[in-house]
């Protein structure tokens, strides 16, 4: 079904492209929010990826690779939007979103905060690698393809980002232990 | 479960929690609103062949056929393809006054293919005939448009308005294809019987016709100036091929995609067809040589011309098709003056260094023009483009030109702007990504030595890998960046 839509859209069928975009927009947006950590910027990046997909669809040689190709466009769009955002408002620090928790209730609140802080300290490139690998479930080879870097670089980014997040959690745990010890 | 697994589980759970389940409706709405106003970029294949997308299998066959023909004949393909097949007439080429009256006048209510028309009032160039399609650009009164003859022909009348396929570039009187900011679409030419454009007058050259003079004229000007009169041309023989014209038609010897030849002089190359009874001297096509051809425009057989094109495929308007065929130069005799090896360098149609992105992106065979000489462009580096690649290729960095899209300075995200796909040799130690969205000076070259090692190991499902020669040719025409500095 998706292949047919891609082929139609590639031939200039806007209705087919609309259907295609509707089927992927939620996934694109979720990924962009995680990478950019800002809903407004993520909206822009998602829009940009969709428009780029339409504009450059004829360069897609194999319709079956639409998803991978679109991921690449999204990563590029996130990179561009992130940079623009930094240029526009360098002084603004974005606050964490306070949406109702719908995920795994087993994550301790302390861990959530620590992950949030650690995640924000990661570079955009490292956040992207983590999101693609751990959220989207891409293999390291697919991560490399989506980011447009060699496999070794993708491995390195995922490894270092994960290490940094782990360190953030452990540091938080140590602080928490010391606080508890002090009270006791 | 070890500590690593625990952490990974925690991280994944947190990411799922943080990810919104749905995008706000406005995201898709806004994106699709923009899509409605955006045209698709032509793919690199379309830039190469000037045709609508074809299947991968057919594309492979076509690439191979064209490359093989080009290599065998030592041709610069540019002169054989529909987008550029009419050479690149310059605005001054036909500006020398003529003392003789035109041999052919335009039929009433018809704009000939490959003619120039002046715009009488502000008009919108649209993606298709009618007001339903998106507006590509607005054309002010006083500008000129080029009426097209490749692909589909006009006139097409809808809602009381007549449209023609046309090309336009702001303040540019020459052939707009491949020019910075050039557009191709449909222009309204008449509304409720009131003309919106008028055919620009043709001024015939006083010089005797020679390949360079003819190449510098519009097809319509050639027909107007020479009519059915005998024209004798001397120059180097250039083998031809059927090219990839987006149509089929009859008679086959007059309407591409039948074989089209060219004759090359010191100042240009001119394409023609051979009358059915003309025999090519033995050995000429194999080794080339100097020839004299005698022929004419406005062949009587044009009256029987039929062309089928478009989506869906339909017979094109007879009036314009007949004019298109009348504009063909038919060689009725061919005399071999001297047989020799053709000169392969420099290729005809090449421009001197430094070229700009528009010129290079319009080159079908940049290697023939520039070899692997260093080239420098001042341009905007746009990272939005990406090209998919088969599963297993090597070297991947060269085969899949997805490191960025180089666009002209000042053409930021301008639709239809010429662009050049780039790659960076990973051993160079730098990345283009830091420069995306900025103006840069880029140095690099075509025909990287690594191109000779290009191989496609994987392929699309159900298809065979592309032949090695075609893969190598693809790599040779990829621009490899060796240096980049911000401007």
Image (cartoon, rainbow, N blue to C red):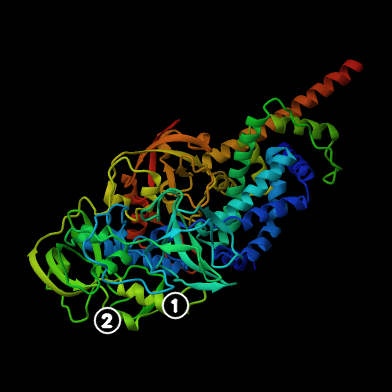
Where residue B384 sits in the image (x, y, percent)? 54, 46
Q: Which residue is mark 2?
A: B300
Asked whether residue B266 appears in the rendered view, the answer is: yes
Q: Residue furthest left?
A: B338
Q: Is residue A129 visible?
A: no
Could you tell whether B293 is left or right of A72 in the image? left
Give the residue displayed 46% in from the left and 43% down from the top. B406
Task: Give whichever of B214, B30 is nearer the camera.
Answer: B214
Q: x and y percent of residue B142 in the render? A: 45, 53
What residue is pinned by disc 1?
B317
| Whole-percent x, y for residue B88 in the image | 32, 56
Residue B374 to residue B178: above or below: above
Q: Residue at x 75, y 42 (%)?
A: B15
Q: Residue furthest top?
A: A182
Q: Specify the quadrant of the image occupied by residue A57.
A: bottom right
Depicted B379 relative to depicted A90: above or below? below
Residue at 72% across, 47% down:
A30
């Amino acid at each position: 079904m998706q292949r047919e839509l891609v082929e139609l859209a590639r031939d200039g069928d806007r209705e087919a492209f609309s259907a295609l975009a509707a089927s992927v927009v939620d996934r694109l947006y979720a990924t962009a929010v995680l990478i950019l950590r800002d809903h407004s910027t993520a909206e822009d990046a998602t829009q940009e990826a969709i428009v780029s997909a339409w504009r450059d669809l004829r360069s897609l040689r194999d319709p079956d690779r639409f998803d991978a190709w679109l991921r690449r466009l999204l990563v590029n769009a996130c990179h561009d939007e992130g940079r623009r955002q930094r240029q526009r408002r360098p002084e603004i620090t974005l606050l964490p979103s306070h949406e109702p928790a719908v995920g795994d209730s087993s994550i301790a609140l302390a861990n959530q905060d620590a992950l949030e802080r650690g995640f924000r300290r990661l570079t955009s490139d490292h956040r992207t690698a983590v999101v693609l690998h751990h959220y989207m479930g891409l293999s390291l080879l697919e991560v490399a393809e989506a980011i447009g870097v060699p496999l070794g670089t993708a491995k390195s980014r995922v490894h270092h980002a994960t290490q940094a997040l782990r360190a953030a959690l452990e540091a938080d745990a140590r602080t928490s232990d010391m606080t508890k010890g002090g009270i006791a | 479960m070890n500590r690593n697994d625990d952490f990974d589980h925690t991280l994944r759970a947190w990411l799922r929690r943080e990810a919104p389940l749905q995008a706000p409706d406005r995201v898709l709405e806004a994106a699709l609103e923009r899509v409605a106003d955006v045209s698709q970029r032509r793919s690199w294949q379309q830039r190469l062949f000037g045709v609508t997308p074809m299947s991968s299998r057919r594309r492979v066959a076509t690439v191979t056929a064209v490359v093989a023909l080009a290599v065998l004949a030592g041709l610069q393909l540019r002169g054989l393809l529909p987008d550029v097949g009419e050479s690149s007439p310059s605005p001054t080429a036909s500006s020398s006054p003529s003392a003789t009256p035109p041999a052919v006048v335009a039929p009433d209510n018809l704009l000939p293919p490959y003619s120039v028309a002046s715009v009488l009032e502000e008009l919108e160039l649209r993606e298709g005939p009618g007001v339903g399609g998106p507006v590509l650009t607005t054309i002010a009164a006083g500008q000129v448009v080029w009426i097209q003859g490749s692909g589909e022909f006009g006139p097409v009348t809808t809602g009381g308005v007549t449209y023609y396929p046309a090309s336009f570039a702001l303040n540019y009187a020459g052939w707009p294809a491949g020019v910075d900011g050039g557009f191709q679409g449909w222009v309204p030419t008449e509304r409720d019987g009131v003309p919106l454009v008028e055919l620009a007058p043709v001024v015939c050259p006083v010089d005797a016709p020679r390949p360079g003079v003819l190449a510098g004229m519009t097809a319509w000007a050639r027909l107007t100036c020479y009519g059915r009169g005998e024209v004798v041309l001397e120059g180097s023989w250039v083998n031809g091929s059927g090219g990839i014209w987006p149509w089929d038609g009859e008679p086959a010897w007059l309407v591409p995609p039948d074989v089209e030849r060219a004759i090359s002089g010191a100042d240009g190359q001119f394409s023609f067809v051979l009358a059915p009874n003309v025999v090519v001297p033995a050995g000429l096509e194999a080794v080339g040589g100097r020839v004299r051809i005698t022929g004419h425009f406005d062949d009587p057989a044009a009256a029987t011309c039929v062309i089928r094109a478009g989506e869906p495929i339909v017979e094109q308007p007879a009036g314009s098709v007949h004019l298109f065929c009348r504009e063909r130069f038919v060689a009725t005799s061919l005399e071999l003056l001297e047989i020799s090896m053709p000169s392969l360098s420099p290729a005809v149609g090449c421009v001197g260094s430094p070229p700009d992105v528009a010129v290079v992106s319009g080159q079908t065979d940049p290697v023939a023009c520039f070899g692997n000489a260093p080239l420098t462009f001042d341009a905007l580096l746009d990272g939005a483009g990406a090209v998919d690649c088969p599963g297993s290729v090597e070297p991947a960095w060269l085969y899949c030109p997805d490191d960025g899209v180089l666009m002209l300075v000042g053409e930021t995200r301008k639709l239809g702007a010429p662009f050049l796909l780039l790659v960076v040799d990973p051993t160079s130690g730098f990345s283009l990504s830091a420069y995306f969205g900025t103006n840069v000076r880029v140095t690099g070259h075509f025909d990287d030595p690594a191109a000779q090692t290009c191989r496609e190991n994987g392929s699309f499902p159900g298809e065979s890998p592309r032949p090695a020669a075609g893969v190598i040719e693809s790599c040779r025409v990829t621009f490899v960046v060796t240096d980049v500095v911000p401007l």
